[in-house]
Image: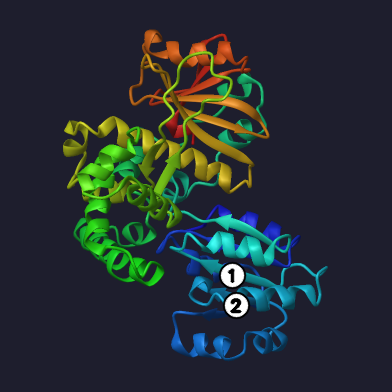
Amino acid sequence: MNRHALALIVELLGLFPCVAIAGVRQCGKTTLLGQIPGDWRIHDLEKQADAETIARDPDLFFRLNPDRVAIDECQLQPRLFPALRVAIDSDRNRPGRYVITGSSSPDLLSAMSESLAGRVAIVELSPFGLAEAHGHPPSGFFPCLAERRPLRDYLGLPARLEPVAIHDYWLRGGYPETWLKNQPRFTKLWMQNYLQTYLDRDLPRLFPGLDREKFRLFANMLAHLSGRVINYSEVARALGASQPTARDYFRIADGTFLWRHLPAYDKDAVKRVVKHPKGFLRDSGLLHYLLRLQDMEQLRAHPGMGASWEGMVIETLLRGLDVQSTDYRAYHYRTGAGAEVDLVLEGEFGLLPIEIKYTQHVDSRSLRAIRDFVEERCCPYGIVLNNDERPRMLDEKLVGVPVGCL
């Protein structure tokens, strides 16, 4: 199953001495290493022999291996980064020499940024996206979004996936193992063991002083907090912990790629706005496992259905922009009076509000908030993502795009 990020990685290897692939555990980083064109020597730091070879003398290792070296799970050896910087600087102008991967470490990106600033390009890899899971190439929607093309360009987008395929992905999520095995019983057991490994092995290794039982309670709370505006005081009370501890737990979940943190958009506010952040569990399959939702009937009847759909669509959007290396920041927007825009993107393409609906037909009255946002901030247009059959203009500055176009 082809990964859309591969083309970006190949491009970056032609420009930078080192490319780093960061992402949640079991999202396919190791498999992707084997798909990079060329003869690469791969060292896995979870294998004792490979770890000892590098740890014995990192500087000598890189002198003996100056080119086409890939190191998997590099966060396990922090001493590696200074030695890698020295190796890169010995032949700074030659691109495509090293690939490193890392997972489940909030300190990983900062360590790479400090030691390898200007020498490394960082690619965030997620589990399968909607198009990847169904074997489709990247959608033309994302170039339209990133380049802020005219509204008429959206009207020509084909809906490449039918609602049944979209709902299948929504229920199952994107972790590769669950798609490759394609068995509900296996998926349930895999999710159970995945969470157990995350809580009992990964986190204690990264945060030795972490209260495991409290964080286990917090991890289960995340499923019910997904899609909601976060009040840290309420979460702290439910945990029986301090507010700084609750904030730290959210930072850990976000830094280990389990949680998507969306700050509030409050720039140039003409109305009183809610400044609390919002968040989502990044993978809808993991969310539904924690909520004990096993089929579409249970999901449709659940009070969190709308938040789950919104989170899945937002992840699909942001992953599509990531594999294009688009520079953006993502926010949510809500006024004190309750008006809300699900996603606000700000980047090289300007300011773009996006509303997410589950229904096929969108009630014009439900679009008042995004219309006001477009008018007040002079946005060129806004986008409404829904389950329509084809893209269509909803009014002069709003275009409706089916999720199937993603």
The residue lying toward the viewer, choosing from 241 and 393, is 241
Rendered residue at 67%/79% (across/down): 83
For label 2, count other residues whose C-alpha is less than 10 Å away and answer few (under 14), some (14-19) or many (20+).
Answer: many
User: Quarter-wise, where is residue 39 in the image?
Assistant: bottom right
Q: Which mark is residue 199?
A: none
Q: Is residue 154 above or below residue 133?
A: above
For label 1, count other residues whose C-alpha is less than 10 Å away and answer few (under 14), some (14-19) or many (20+).
Answer: many
| x and y percentages locating residue 384 in the rendered image | 46, 22
Q: Are marks 1 and 2 in contact (CB under 8 Å)?
A: yes
Rendered residue at 74%/73% (across/down): 88
Q: Secondary structure at mark 1?
A: strand
Residue for badge 1 = 100
Q: Would you say residue 183 is visible in this rendering?
A: no
Q: Amino acid at mark 1?
A: Ile
Q: Earlier in the sequence, mark 1 or mark 2?
A: 2
Q: Amino acid at mark 2?
A: Leu
Residue for badge 2 = 80
| x and y percentages locating residue 136 in the rendered image | 49, 46
Rendered residue at 38%/66% (across/down): 207
From the viewer's perspective, tell me whether residue 195 is left or right of residue 111: left
From the viewer's perspective, tell me whether residue 162 is left or right of residue 60: left
Q: Is residue 38 above or below residue 106?
A: below
| x and y percentages locating residue 185 in the rendered image | 19, 59
Rendered residue at 57%/12% (across/down): 376
